Image (cartoon, grey):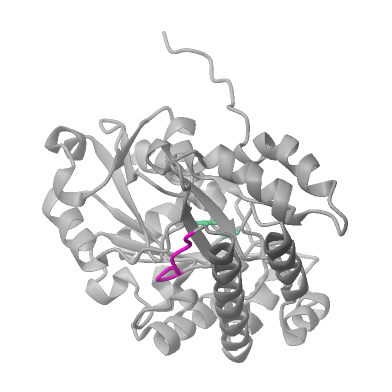
Amino acid sequence: MREPFVPPPYPYDRLDELKAVGSGLPGGLVDLSIGTPCDPPPPAVIEALARSGAERGYPASIGSAAYREAAAGWMARRLGVDVDPTNVAACVGTKELVAGVPQLLRLRRPDLDTVLYPAISYPTYAMGATLAGCRAVPYRELDAIDPADAARALCLWVNVPGNPTGELGDLGAAAAWGREHGVPVLSDECYVEFTWEGPPRTILEHGHDGVVAVHSLSKRSNLAGARAGMYAGDPALVHYLSEVRKHAGFMVPGPVQAAAIAAWGDDDHVDEQRERYRQRLDGMAAALSKAGIDAPTPSGAFYLWVPAPDGDAWALARRLAETGGCLVSPGEFYGPAGAGFVRVAVVQPDDRIALVADRLATA
Ligand SMILES: Cc1ncc(COP(=O)(O)O)c(C=O)c1O
């Protein structure tokens, strides 16, 4: 018999004590733990949200035609890939999809029970496996995946640029691995607009067969509170997932769909946002460096992945709370392999980041 499921503590709830430490400093806590945007979405997006008139009726679970066309148009413009809007479907932000997809894939393939995910990564890949009663099996390199695990895999997750490391993994290799092993590859690309080295990358550059790209407006357009995302790629997979999700009642609210159409249609606000994150990453890395903490700048995303000087991430997090008044995430939140690092999310306004820099400089 299986053990009853007891939800583990939510990672960020484990930071309460350090939060209290940072809050005690004059000027208060600067929260650099959760990657939640602080900057405003563009006014036209808020206008569309307020004035859509779409609040009365049920919205389409798969997303309106205009929603899917706007998403496909954005992919063509910014990522250089042609996607037929019929192979695009809506999700209510992407976390629910990430957490729920193993269960849906398992309904289709009850003989499989394994989710493969990067060893240092967003915790919801592993949690999605757990919630489906599956095995969550981390991998470091595609080549090192045990063939026995590959044979049992419902899917393989990739995340480029990666949270928390900012790394730009090889999406072509992931697509090829999936095809070779007959395992669907799910590519979480929510930080794609914040790629700092080279052009933005999507797995759909490498064909659509057996792969699905997952995208969010939370980071791109500062719409994490509205909950809008989409997935696109392999027609059979997108069709299967969107049909089951329709039965389950997943729907992006109509007004949010209207806002999302406006957001996907505009790139200027994203270029501004890129500049903000770029400056904050540089500013924060410089402040840490002055305090004797080496913080390499990432290849993508808006996190600094900082090795703890003596390998003790909780001690570094405490030091930063005590001297900088800032809250950061110990790397173990992203898997045991991340234990010697902390993640610093530059998701606070410039003056708050500057306050941390001043405090660190005078500590
Ligand atoms: C890698 C990754 N995927 C997915 C998400 C979920 O974003 P959302 O549910 O807001 O689309 C996050 C949020 O931090 C993330 O870091």
Closer to us: 216 or 359: 359
- Residue in the picture at 16% in, 55% down: 177
Q: Which residue is drawn at 31% across and 31% down?
A: 113
Is residue 332 shown above or below 199?
above
Name the residue nearer the viewer: 120 or 203: 120
The residue segment tinted magenta is 294-300
Quarter occupied by the C terminus: bottom right
Residue at the front extreme, as displayed: 362
Dominant secondary-structure state across the stretch colored magenta: loop
In this view, the residue in front, 276 or 95, is: 276
Q: In this view, does 83 lie above or below 177?
A: below
Question: Quarter containing ligand 1?
Answer: bottom right
- Please tell me in which quadrant of the rendered image residue 195 appears: bottom left
Q: Could you say where residue 207 lies in the image, as x and y percent from the top left? A: 23, 72
Q: Where, quadrant-wise, is the N terminus in this rendering?
A: top left
**Quadrant hosting residue 64:** bottom right
Whole-percent x, y for residue 275 in the image? 58, 84
| Residue under the point 26% across and 66% down | 171
Q: Is 145 a magenta residue?
A: no
> Which residue occupies the foreground of this view, 166 or 109?
166
Q: Does residue 107 appear left or right of residue 179 in this picture?
A: right
From the top left corner, tell me how far across and down residue 36 is, in percent. 66, 60
Tag count: 0
Does 180 sit left or right of 3 as displayed? left
Question: Left of 259 or right of it: where is 188?
Answer: left
In this view, the residue farthest toward the top is 1
Question: Where does residue 334 sit, x and y in percent of width and height?
Answer: 47, 44
Judge from the rendering whether residue 287 lies leftward or rightward of residue 234; answer left or right.
Answer: right
User: Which residue is rendered at x = 65% and y = 84% of the image?
Assistant: 262
